[in-house]
Image (cartoon, rainbow, N blue to C red):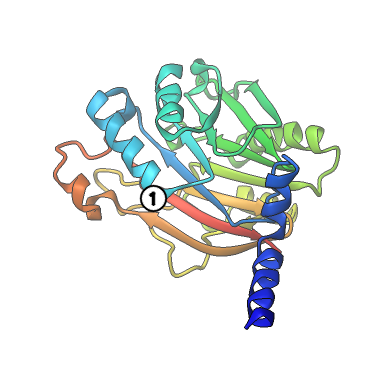
Amino acid sequence: MLVSLKSKVVATIMKYKKLLFGILFFVPYSLEALPLRIVSFNCNWGIAWHGIRASIARMLKELNADIICLQEIPKKRHARYLAKKLGMHRKSTKWHTGGMAIIAKRTIQDFIVKDIPKLESNAFQNGVVAINIHNTWISCVHLTDLQYNISDVERIRELTYILDALYNKTKTSSGNIILAGDFNDAQEESAMSALLESQGFVDTHKNKPWQRGTWIPATTVPERIDRIYSKGPFIVKSGRVIDETNIPWLQRKQWITGADHRLIITELEMG
């Protein structure tokens, strides 16, 4: 019986050795220790309303994400509110760039916050916000809105600026990178997706049973413009598109989340 108990103790220690090592020696555990759950959500400014803000905070808390990438947040205080409610860390863009924020459970070791040069056909100012956690860079993305009818050349220039900012930090184009956000590109095969695939990025929801429309315009069929891409030794464990109208406690809310986008979530593991 003593031998059996000893074997169980050894097996438990081996199973959680990375986490135990981090606790014992006060070293933050690496991304290899646990799956990484990533959420992307375009709030569509609904978060400015107090009741909706509380609903979004509760929904995000129940999803128990490690990384939350948010787009279209009107004010810095709204991102601060969510980070405080969730007990997480935060980095945000300047608010003239459309309001993006990344909220993270783990300590942010480095970050990027900068403007993207304006596109020639666009008066909208976009930006970059990215964080580094244990040698993996996560960037929140919000490419120029479909209403501006930008060309593939302009979209590629905008995306390339984001990638160059990340590669400048990783010092290589082969580092671990996650892009999550509103890409405003409903085409399954486009110049943008071809560029990302050529550089080793994987569309974590492409050709998967959980693929569904994420943008919900009033007059057309939902389109998949919100996406999560990963680059590096990641394995996609699961992914969902969250339909908030199916969440029982949210069904009682008049405004639900106030957004015209559905939230997407992906769970990754290091391969």
Name, please, the residue furthest toward the front. Answer: 2
Residue under label 1, please give it. Answer: 214
175 in relation to 163, above or below: below
- Residue 218: image quadrant is top left
* Residue 246 picture location, percent across and down: 24, 55
Q: Nearer the viewer, residue 240 or 20?
A: 20
- Residue pictured at 69% horizontal, 64% vertical: 13
Q: Amino acid at mark 1?
A: Thr
Where is residue 10 drawn, in percent x and y? 70, 70
Residue 164 location in percent, x, y? 76, 34
Q: Quadrant of the C terminus?
A: bottom right
Please tell me whether mark 1 sits on a helix, a strand or a loop: loop
- Name the residue located 51 percent from the left edge and 68 percent from the top edge: 207
Measured along the vertical axis of the image, is residue 194 above or below residue 3?
above
Residue 116 appears in the rendering:
no
Q: Is residue 212 left or right of residue 165?
A: left
